[in-house]
Image (spheres, grey):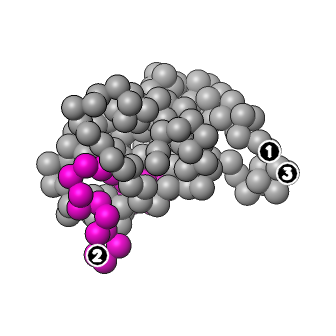
Amino acid sequence: MGGGRGIVQRLCIILAISPANQDIATSDAIKLAREVDPSGDRTFGVLTKLDLMDKGTNALDVLEGRSYRLQHPWIGIVNRSQADINKNVDMIVARRKEHEYFATSPDYGHLASKMGSMYLARLLSKLYFCVPSLNIKTIIFIGLSTDVVILFLALGVCN
């Protein structure tokens, strides 16, 4: 896989982003992360599009680490829909909607405190700023949505 040169560096965190409405076993992001970080020490799994999964299905096996285990916990996020983007829904409203989605979800409600873009940003911020022994230089985003990158930049989480 040619796109992974930057993530070979040991001083970076890898966010392997995969849509929840596709088979995680075929995720290019996960394959690439496994290739360059076989121990999984630097890899965080992020599932997007949880709100777009077929009715009656969920991603609990992945989010709870039963079907595809990583060293770090999986984090689910829900981004703005195309309709929200077209209506110029701002990021504050989008994050509130994301929080409500997890808090009220029959499938994910018990995980709500550890889901969402804000939780992911806090987790990465803690690693980036509060654990200097990691000496992390870069956060590599594989397949991350523009919304989340903008959020991280606004929070000062990535350089």
Residue 89 lies left or right of residue 121; in this view the side is right
Image quadrant assignment for residue 64: top left
Q: Which residue is mark 1?
A: 89
Residue 39, image x, y percentages:
14, 48
Image quadrant assignment for residue 65: top left
SS for callout 2: loop
Q: Which residue is mark 3?
A: 87
**Which quadrant: the N terminus?**
bottom left
Residue 58, image x, y percentages:
47, 43
- The front one of 119 and 7 is 7
Residue 51 seen: no
Residue 68, image x, y percentages:
26, 47
Residue at image x 36%, y 39%? 74
Q: Are marks 1 and 2 in contact (CB under 8 Å)?
A: no
User: What number is the disc on residue 1?
Assistant: 2
Residue at image x 56%, y 45%? 153
10 Å neighbourhood of mark 1: few (<14), some, or many (≥20)? some
Q: Are marks 1 and 3 in contact (CB under 8 Å)?
A: yes
Residue 136 lies left or right of residue 37; in this view the side is right
Residue interval drawn in magenta:
1-24
